[in-house]
Amino acid sequence: MKGTKERAASLLLVMVLLLGLTAPASAAVTQSDLQKAVDGSAAYMLQAVKGPQVGSIGGEWAVIGLARSGYDVPQSYYDSYLSTVTKYVQNKKGILDERKYTEYSRVILALTAIGADPTDVAGYDLVKPLGDFEKTVWQGINGPIWALIALDSGNYEPAGAPGIQQRYIDEILSRQLDDGGWNLTGKGGAGAADADLTGMALQALAKYQDQSAVKTATDEALACLSAMQTESGGFGSWGTANSESCVQVIAALCELGIGLDDSRFVKNGVTLLDNLLTFRQADGSFLHTADGSGSNQMASEQGFYGLVAALRAAKGQASLYRMSDTGTAPSTPGASTGTGLAGKDPAVQKTSITAPGTTFPDIAGHTNQSAIEAMAARGIISGSNGVFNPDNTMTRAEFAAIIVRALGLTTETTGQFTDVSADQWYAPYVGAAYKYGIITGTTATTFNPGGTIKREDAAVMAARAAKLCGLDTDMDASAIRNVLAQFTDYIRTSEYARPPLAFCYHADILSQSDLDIWPADAVKRCEVAQMLYNLLDKAELL
């Protein structure tokens, strides 16, 4: 629910000074400023939404913003999302929602943005439902608006529904109010326009300006929005100035090819972009209202893609929702696409998929599900009796084996350790791990293969493996201290483990979102799978 307090003028000035990205009325936001803002917000989004799901928050809008931003996002991020969508669609048997067809539209937009094919997701055509006019418009104006935007994003034609786009255009036009705008419940005639819905309607109609009725409606809507714009250059909804309303108008102008410095949308020398940036916080997130009320994550996702729309317009690129420039579809996790870094050891080889689609019933919905499945598809890690047991611990021998498999190293029995018999299944893996410097043993002659591997020792082996893969693992003492000092228990780490631990956190092989390192705790199987997935991703071996 949107807040009710208006922004105080003094708070505006304070935020402008603090953010440093918001220009005063006398100075325009440069493309360089905008690029920095987009990059900063993209970095925030990658941290805030580490595993995008199917949903209006923490899902498609984050994916769309990142995919259209030009920011350097790891391919594994999109792979993970595509895998999540595929499983979701499978579980729902292709029916995302019985009544809210905007669910289809939102997912179609995200899949199109990452270059995936929404007409074939686990064998289901997600575009086809948007050919059902009655079901699509059931939920009101949002239905035809987002159906039209989604269909036009990839020039999709729902099977068996010729001319459906025109029906949606006509439906949107029929709901325009006398004041020139749209609101959530209005069906034409009297009523007060809502900036959000008016902006969304214009985004949907932008492609059809060659139709005289659409052009007339657009001109009336722009006049309505211009009159609604506040003296601070922004917009409100439900009586409250907020960032999201501003975003929808920015997106509308960008889809229409209208500059954000258009005189109709500059108040007291302040543009829409100036106004939006006053809601942006130093970490790249966005406030909903000036006083911080409302859902900041929703505001952050919308604020981010609003900046992306503005940047694409400034660069002369295809607009946010015209996605013919997205390229080919990414692979699902498990598809072997990486070639490895130039500096990797020649012995390190990309591991091919041998069991595509492998999964386990006890990892459904697990935080590390995508990583586990990707590793299992390559035969790097396996289950037992049909399950994975994600929270079980792992022996030192088992860890040595999976890290050797992950790097595609040739196995070799060396006889280095007296407690590793040559007839044991793990002997060739321990031998290879020793040969390539991944392990050194608990002493010069023992390895303790049956011992449970601790978190800090797993990090040590992972860092050595990363070096073999061509990653730069060297960090000076100051950098090591700065990384580890953020964890409350870093003083409990062993001296030998601190440089490798710092590297693993710095390289995102381990997650810096944890509050503690728990160095002496036994590492879990699910954690090992995620570590290896992150390592191979960084090494470009996925």
Image: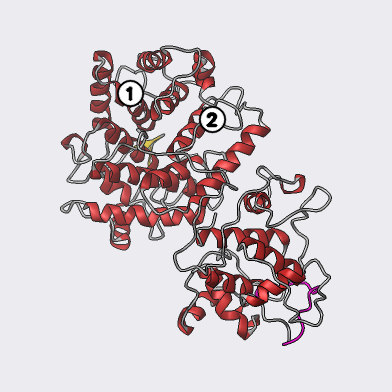
Q: Position of residue 313 (x, y in %)?
A: 26, 41
Looking at the image, residue 8 sits to the left or right of residue 498; the answer is left
Residue name at image x 54 percent, y 17 percent: 135
The residue tagged 2 is 103
Mark 1: give few (<14), some (14-19) or many (20+) Cα within 10 Å. many
Q: Which mark is residue 205?
A: 1
Give the amino acid at mark 2.
Answer: Glu
Q: Which residues are magenta?
A: 444-457
Answer with mark 2 or mark 1, whichever residue precedes in sequence. Answer: 2
Give the amino acid at mark 1.
Answer: Leu
Image position of 507 with respect to 360: above or below: below
Q: Secondary structure at mark 2?
A: helix
State how far apart marks 2 and 1 are (Cα): 20 Å
Q: Which mark is residue 297?
A: none
Displayed quadrant of residue 163: top left
Image position of 299 with respect to 21: above or below: above
Image position of 365 with respect to 441: above or below: above
Q: Is residue 448 magenta?
A: yes
In this orientation, does residue 54 appear?
yes
Q: Position of residue 160 (x, y in %)?
A: 50, 12
Q: Position of residue 271 (x, y in %)?
A: 23, 44
In this orientation, does residue 242 appear?
no
Looking at the image, residue 468 sits to the left or right of residue 168; the answer is right
Q: Main secondary structure of the magenta part?
A: loop
Residue name at image x 27 percent, y 46 percent: 273
Residue name at image x 45 percent, y 24 percent: 147
Mark 2: give few (<14), some (14-19) or many (20+) Cα within 10 Å. many
